[in-house]
Image: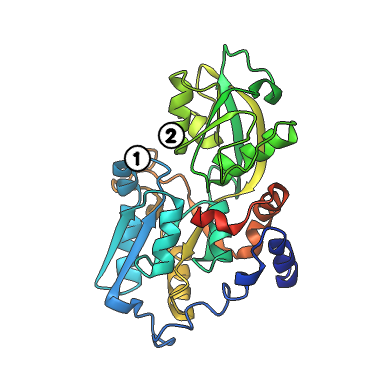
Amino acid sequence: MYNRREIVRALGGIGLTGTLAGCTSQSGQGSNQDASQPSFGDNRATFYMSPSEPQQLMQSQYAPIQSMLQEELDVESATLRYAAGYSAVLQSLAGGTGDIAETGPFAAALGVAKDRCDIILQRYGYGSWTYASVIVTQEDSNIQSLGDLQGEPIAFADRLSASGALYPLYMLQQAGLSIGDLPTDTGDAEFTPQFSSHSEAFAALDRGQVSAAGVGQFITLDDNRELKEGFRYVDMTEGIPRAPIVVSPELNETEQTAVKEAFVNAQDTLYLGEDATADTEDDLWFSDVREASNETYQPVIDVADALGISAELLDS
């Protein structure tokens, strides 16, 4: 377990030290809210969804969470919003237009450093608290190793995605390819990057528009949790801590605790989507949560440190 001083030291290597101190237990103290009551300002709670899947599907998947938050937080209304990207999620939390969000590990780590979110929960899915990032190609491709991707077009997810940008770039760098200033600047890399989303990146590979895709393994799997037919992995990194639930730093300690307890104490039907039926399309990918903090995502910070990535990426 890393202590606070170790986290500050690690974040200092990627330009994140200065803001960490205000991103843990002191959250929300700059607001005028009574810290003893979970008032949520205007008596409304807004939950932001990151665009990992199509909007209509995610609205159905997260409908029980919307209902749960309205009931458990005792607010007038709870609203789901679909963000344009990870950065938009963090901007909403920092600006007070969002209260709670689901986002990726890398985006959350950067958001903590820039005082745009606080990490409160880690999600559990497919039998593990961790997941994998892959670089995948078509089965009949000439790409046999990462070195073969020199000069080739590669699709990635959002620039702030851990499994769809950070880890694929790290794998490419470790294989000897220059990544230039990625993911900030697309110039000088020894391949041609294209950033979008997990689903769009994998679709671009399926259409033959790119030679490989760097994405979360989850987007490459069929209903049986097997690699979809017609594709093969070039490389993989496992053990990435699964994505967190984060909250706005504008929420006071009582409000953050209320959100945390609402999720931790929720019934299993929370994860079954709008139809409340198991093994249907609108089931959430995760099936449990546990308390988490900045330290949970230290492995992600370490990779960002190795690539020299600064928290200023959020504003680029």
Tag on residue 108?
A: none
Name the mark on residue 199: 2
Q: Amino acid at mark 2?
A: Ser
Q: How many marks?
A: 2
Find the distance from the CA under tag 2 to the CA under tag 1.
8 Å
In the rendered structure, the answer to whether residue 278 lies left or right of residue 260 reads left
The answer to whether marks 2 and 1 mark residues whose Cβ atoms lie closer than 8 Å is yes
Q: Nearer the viewer, residue 174 or 280?
A: 174
Is residue 227 visible in the rendered image? The answer is: yes
Q: Which residue lies at the image location 42% right of the left edge and 61% below the top edge? A: 91
| Quadrant, the N terminus | bottom right
- The residue that appears at 38% across and 80% down in the rendered structure is 38
Element at badge 2?
helix
Q: Secondary structure at mark 1?
A: loop
Residue 15 lies in what quarter of the image?
bottom right
Percent position (x, y) of residue 40?
35, 76
Seen from the viewer's position, the closer of residues 72 and 108 is 108
Q: Position of residue 215 (x, y in %)?
A: 54, 35
Q: Residue at x 62, y 13 (%)?
A: 142
In the rendered image, the vertical position of residue 246 relative to residue 54, given as above or below: below
Place residue 75 in its image quadrant: bottom left
Q: Which residue is mark 1?
A: 54
Q: Is residue 68 shown above or below 146?
A: below
Vertical order, 216 against 138 (above or below): below
Task: Give residue 45's position: percent from left, percent from top.
Answer: 32, 68
First in sequence: mark 2 vs mark 1:
1
Instruction: Report x, y in % for residue 74.
Output: 31, 74
